[in-house]
Amino acid sequence: MLNIAQAYPKLEQWNKVLEWGQKAASCDPKSYLAYNQIAFAHNKMKRWDEAEAAARKALQIQDNPISRSQIDLAQKGRNAEATNLQAELDKAAYEAEIEKQRLEEEERQRRLKEWEIKTGEAGNGNEKAEKTD
């Protein structure tokens, strides 16, 4: 079963890797390799918490570098997702602020034109050009 779980990554069928890794772990609960396969599959599916839990289970059975790297990968994946989410939120807030400023400027321009019409200072626009020359 573990061999089958180890064959599916070449096909990128992460659900099958997970399925056969779980079957291998159920038959041999002391197989750290089975839990490493489970952690690997969860990491590939971006299920960071499950990946870390499986890798920690493998470490409890036997200290090994693969489990440590799976934990590190899960933590980095979780952090990257959080960073990307924050960047999206920051971008949305920035765009909302720009839109707010644009609307405020449009309102200011509208009020200015309204005031110019009301006070009789509205002209054909040439007065401003002549004054700047």
Image (tube, rainbow, N blue to C red):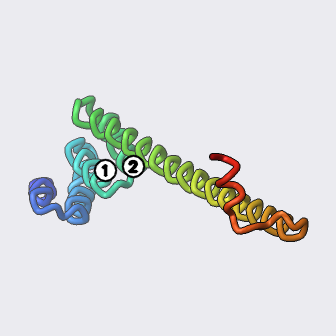
Q: Provide the residue designation for mark 2.
A: 48
Q: How crowded is mark 2: few (under 14 residues within 10 Å), some or many (20 or more)?
A: many
- Left/right placement of residue 39 relative to residue 112 reads left
Please tell me whether residue 112 is drawn above or below residue 72 in the rendered image.
Answer: below
82 relative to 62, above or below: below
Asked whether, in this view, residue 119 is left or right of residue 36, the answer is right
Q: Which amino acid does label 2 sit on?
A: Trp
Is the Cβ of the residue at disc 2 closer than 8 Å to that at disc 1?
A: yes
How far from the left and from the top, in percent, is residue 88? 50, 53
- In depth, the one of 99 and 48 nearer the eye is 99
Label 1 crowd (10 A; few <14 / some 14-19 / many >=20): many
Q: Which residue is drawn at 49% across and 47% down?
A: 87
Element type where label 1 sits in the image: helix
Tell me what residue is drawn at x 25 percent, y 49 percent: 40
Residue 43 bears which disc, if any?
Answer: 1
Q: Is mark 2 on a helix, strand or loop?
A: helix
